[in-house]
């Protein structure tokens, strides 16, 4: 079997569907490599600035959540203390 015959066998009608799938995958891969550069128009400096701002915002929100958690823990401690006082008073009455 010569190389020409092998090439004709690969390009035969019964294998055409496979070549269409391979071609489609190649086109999608090329588009996947090229499209982000068209969509992302910000410069690297702008990107770093935006990331720094986003990180600062996340740190601020994280600190706020921690403060709320501490406040809830303190409120829970006060509540548990008052419940234990009520239970002690009920135990003394019996």
Image: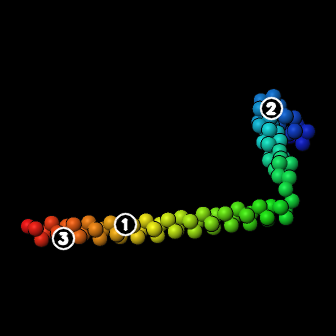
| Rendered view: 29 above or below 59 | above
Query: Which of the two discs, 2 and 1, labels the residue nearer the N terminus?
Result: 2
In the picture, measured across the screen, residue 34 lies left or right of residue 55, that is right
Q: Position of residue 67 (x, y in %)?
A: 52, 68
Residue at position x 84%, y 34% from top?
11
Closer-to-camera residue (75/10): 75
Dot 3 lies on which element? helix
Tell me, yes or no, whether the two marked residues, 3 and 1, touch with CB atoms within 8 Å.
Answer: no
Q: Which residue is labeled 1 in the image?
A: 76
Tell me, yes or no, if residue 15 can be seen here. no
What is the count of numbered marks?
Answer: 3
Q: Position of residue 3 (x, y in %)?
A: 90, 42
Mark 3 nearby-residue class (10 Å; few <14, some 14–19, many ≥20): few
Q: Which residue is labeled 2 in the image?
A: 16
Mark 1 nearby-residue class (10 Å; few <14, some 14–19, many ≥20): few
Closer-to-camera residue (29/49): 49
Residue at position x 12%, y 71% from top?
92
Residue at position x 83%, y 42% from top?
27
Q: Which residue is labeled 3 in the image?
A: 88
Query: Which of the two discs, 3 and 1, labels the residue nearer the N terminus?
Result: 1
Closer-to-camera residue (84/12): 84
Quadrant location of the C terminus in the rendered image: bottom left
């Amino acid at each position: 079997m010569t190389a020409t015959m092998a090439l004709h066998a690969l390009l035969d009608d019964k294998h055409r569907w496979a070549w269409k799938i391979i071609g489609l995958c190649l086109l999608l891969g090329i588009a996947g490599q090229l499209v982000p550069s068209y969509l992302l128009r910000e410069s690297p400096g702008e990107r770093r600035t935006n990331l720094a701002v986003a990180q600062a915002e996340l740190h601020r929100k994280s600190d706020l959540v921690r403060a709320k958690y501490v406040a809830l823990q303190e409120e829970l401690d006060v509540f548990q203390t008052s419940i234990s006082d009520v239970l002690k008073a009920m135990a003394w009455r019996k």
